[in-house]
Amino acid sequence: MENIFETNVLDSNEAKVMDKLTIESGIMEETLMEQAAFAIADVASSFSPKKILCVAGTGNNGGDCIAAGRILHNKGYNVEIYIYGKNQSNGFKKQLLIAENYGLKIKYNKDFSDEYDLIIDGLIGIGLNGEVRSSIKTVIEKINSSNAKVISEDIPSGISSDTGEVMGDAVHADITITFGNLKIGQILYPGREFSGKLKIAELSFKKFISNRKIITPDIIKVPNRKKDSHKYDYGNVLILAGSSKYPGAPILTALGAQRIGAGLVTLITPGDSSKILSFEPSIIYSSLNKNNFEKNDLKKLNDEIERANVIILGPGMTEDSIEFVVELIKKQGRTKNIVLDAESIQAIKEFESLSENILITPHVGEMKKIFKNLKNNIFELERFSKQKKCIIMLKSSITTITDGEKTFFNLLGSSSLSKGGSGDLLSGIVGGLIAQGLDTINACITGSYIMYKTAKELSNEYTEYFITPKLISENLYIGFKL
Ligand SMILES: NC(=O)C1=CN([C@@H]2O[C@H](COP(=O)(O)OP(=O)(O)OC[C@H]3O[C@@H](n4cnc5c(N)ncnc54)[C@H](OP(=O)(O)O)[C@@H]3O)[C@@H](O)[C@H]2O)[C@@H](O)CC1
Ligand SMILES: Nc1ncnc2c1ncn2[C@@H]1O[C@H](COP(=O)(O)OP(=O)(O)O)[C@@H](O)[C@H]1O
Ligand SMILES: [K+]
């Protein structure tokens, strides 16, 4: 991604509001279109094309496209404009008239040939409503089967700017030039892939602050470490995780919490995770010597629970431990910081509402088990977080963090993380940051940033095949270098 001076991520409604506020402030729609068109024409020229095809719809996205064609024609390029659709927006009509006055060749609803080496896709932008109609689908297929380079205006036609979903069919762009701000549909897959390289063209929009942002180094908050300090200044993390079946997962969680700087890390598990002591003897370890946690273990663990300022539950647990988790949430859910990962997340089904000191860190499969309606839908995720009153870090190729009001997207991940154990490590890292005093949202932002950045840097050296969660934990210092 280039030119990321703007980290706001807008939905289509916000983009329309931003347009409206700008126009109400006195900037004319024609001015914005001209700026958008110049930005497109600049990028188009950089390809040194021999023959350019502008494929325009009849909305303002099409208007931008015609204007870009006119600017390129004026620069001396060989340009043809093909128009598809009926209902013409005012912006479109104006651009069509100017293009005709400037002597451009324009064709309507006709099949185009294969002779172009650059196509500008201005069929549909943020105005897409529903599945792409069949007449436009045919045009999209034709663009995708051409050998020409493709520049999409604002968003590849056919991608929902709100979800990133392909609405029937969508243009596969080499470059997408978006106007003013990023849109959700360019951030989330598959839209991200269809967008190709992303560029933001800064038009004269009125400043618009969205509650959704991508995570960039400037918002990372690393907890302070004082010269005059002791271990109790950096928090006490209690990890209640694992089972006789999965003894490895809690080891990674404990390593994550330790390597991110927590003062004390205690791991108590039903199974045998004693290998942790050979990896990191400073971790306080004990086993309950059974298969799973049971409700009545809570009493035994009372002292450790009281001492902890963060409790991480879940990695390596099986569903047999759920009753224990439910009971712990009932007793401590309003007072302690609790991180629910992996199987323990299912416990929240038992609660109508939780509290903002509870974080759940599901991957998409785990999220679907607690929330069946979730598709690729940020609005639903935000609603769910608000309704349940808990913070959510939804882990995927793009990790989304929300408290229902503010939402952050981590775009740094890579396939080196698509391995069992990455999530276990992450819950430890995030818990370790909460222990050091970061609020939960900032712990998720900073923890996921440090871990994913470490994975990325290591992958550059060792490949995405070779990296393991343990190797990431041992090299976490790399991610601290912002
Ligand atoms: N306003 C401004 O100041 C600025 C706006 N800007 C630009 O305007 C864009 C937004 O323009 P917009 O609102 O006119 O909508 P737009 O993306 O062209 O889509 C409408 C067209 O798509 C068509 N269409 C829709 N759904 C369809 C479907 N399912 N299947 C098939 N066709 C479908 C629809 O056809 P209809 O349904 O009307 O028949 C109509 O032709 C924005 O992305 C940016 O590029 C920039 O210039 C900066 C300043
Ligand atoms: N292709 C990818 N791109 C970016 N991040 C990824 C990718 N695959 C996995 N991840 C990240 O790796 C982690 C995997 O978590 P999870 O599935 O819970 O692992 P486990 O439960 O095995 O520990 C998540 O943080 C996820 O965001
Ligand atoms: K488009």
Image (tube, rainbow, N blue to C red):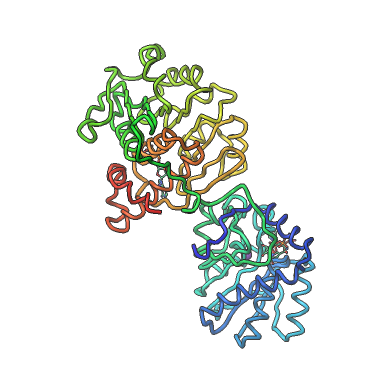
When asked about the image quadrant of residue 306, the answer is top left
Can you tell which quarter of the image residue 128 is in?
bottom right
Residue at figure coordinates x 62%, y 43% from the top left: 379
Q: Which residue lies most toward the left here?
A: 278
Ligand 1, image quadrant it occupies: bottom right
The residue sitting at 39% across, 11% down in the picture is: 299
In percent of width and height, residue 85 lies at 72, 66
The answer to which of 149 and 38 lies nearer the viewer is 38
Q: Residue furthest front?
A: 228
| Quadrant of the rendering where the C terminus is positioned | bottom left
**Residue 145, relative to residue 361: is it above or below?**
below
Position of residue 180 in the picture relative to residue 4 (left or right): right
Percent x, y of residue 335: 51, 22
Q: Residue at 35% across / 40% down in the picture?
A: 227
The picture places residue 301, in percent across and down from the top left corner, at 37, 16
What residue is shown at x 64% (from left), y 68% (from top)? 122
x, y percent for residue 304: 36, 19
Quick check: 316 left or right of 24? left
Marker count (numbered): 0
Left/right placement of residue 235 relative to residue 284 reads: right
* 296 sits left or right of 359 in the view: left
Q: Quadrant of residue 106?
A: bottom right
| Above/below status of 445 relative to 151 | above
